[in-house]
Amino acid sequence: MQLSAKDAWKRILDEAHRELPDHTIRTWLEPTEAIALDEGRLIVGAPDQFAVEWNETKHATLLSKLAEPVIGQPTAVVFRVHEDRQKRPQMDFFVAPSPPAAVVVAVNPSTQPLNERYTFDTFVIGKSNELAAAAAHAAAESPGKTYNPLFIYGATGLGKTHLMQAIAHAVCERQPETRVLYVGAEQFINEVIESIHSRTMPEFRRRYRTDVDLFLVDDVHFLEGKEMTQEEFFHTFNALYEGNKQIVLTSDRPPKEIPGLEARLVSRFEWGMVADIGQPDLEHRIAILRKKQEQDHLELTIPDDVLRFIAEHVRSNVRELEGCIIKLLLFASLKHKEVSIELAREALSDRIRPGEDGMASPKALPSINKVQEVVARRWGVTPEGLRSKARIKTLTVPRQIAMYLARELLEMQLVEIGQAFGGRDHSTVIHSVDKVSRQMSRDRTFRERVEHARQELCAE
């Protein structure tokens, strides 16, 4: 008996759980629905064109491979926009009325203005931020629908605020009447305290829960431990979410990793899309520098070899990379010299990584396979064991150490590291890295053993 399209798709998704991270399944594949199965094709409906293109590019090949044993013959998984899937189930109970076309409300009633430079056009996409950028584009195209809330996390200076504000600029360009409220979590905390003291909570609640179409909150990790503020934020979040208002949040860590954050807020922050922004790789850093040069219409042209030199030696974040351009050009102007690698080495001497003279490219990084191989040998297990699903202690500890070293030494995203260790999600990687760090701080023998593994990898 031939499987129905629905049953076939369900079985394929069950198999996909073994190949893809849970959050990928949750975000991109669970909101889909099988439409038809015929003539060697399984047609799957996705919520919008963006989701169609993303799934076709990122997942269709793997899913088609998984479909063959399930269906019993070669079958191509093809995605199409499915009108009935354009809203998530939890959104269907409430449809917010559109604001009157004749009424134009001032954009961004908060005290923090939007930065006009933070647009999608000026955001440079690379492997470390493509998921967050894709989700931000989708949120801007369908605010309050597909990815709500959108939670973006990552280290300082990697572009979280840029993406958040790019959403606002894109939405306001299409719908100028959109009421945008952009606020930092610290400002929200201060306004709650002030409103309580001045007995103006009704006004505070009206401004945050009624007069807003797009709610942007930076650095929500500052809410940790603030019980009264979390209570207000919880009700504000609920009011906006139930009104189909788009919510975008940023943090330096994922919701589950924010200490002192109430479970009900953690749950709500994870309702929509949680996307991380990692450290940019070399090619991405070069692209960022070129974009900065182009965006600022700089009078002095920086040669490609100088851009590469900067990108090879400054790896911390986007903000510092861009600062290097400004500092170098100012230095060249003051010294009345042409921009060169020698001048860059002199101008950026405080930014060059210790131990590198700038004359040659930094030593090539070891591969993730090499990390697994070295750790496995030193801890008496196999690389295959580290990549397996097994959770026995003899494998768990070296697996966590390998994840820690991969995070410390390689330019990889958390998700990539998780995939290299049996498809584990980013929260498992974060837990592993933190656990190894804590153990190293209190156990000298353990620390020395990990450091010896690191030295071997760095000496390759």
Image (spheres, grey):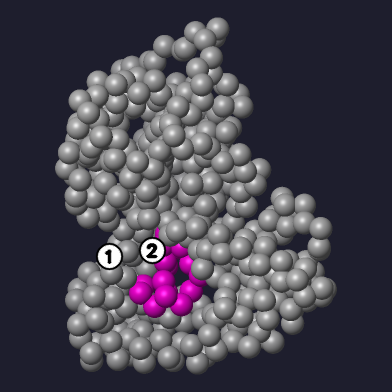
What residue is at 38 percent from the left and 28 percent from the top? 88
In three-dimensional space, the C-alpha distance between marks 2 and 1, rounded to whole angstroms, equals 11 Å
Which region of the structure is painted magenta?
403-420
Disc 1: which residue = 431
Q: Nearer the viewer, residue 420 or 442?
A: 442
Residue in the foreground of this view, choosing between 436 and 303? 303
User: Residue 117, how many percent across, how many down?
Assistant: 62, 43
Residue closer to the observer: 299 or 417: 299
Residue type, label 2? Gly
Is 110 left or right of 358, judged from the image as shown?
left
Position of residue 107 in the picture relative to residue 398 (left or right) = right
The location of residue 202, given as percent across then percent down, is: 25, 20
Q: Residue 265 is drawn in which quadrant?
A: top left
In the picture, the disc for residue 418 is 2
Is 7 drawn above or below residue 396 in the view shown? above
Asked if residue 253 lies in the magenta stretch, the reply is no
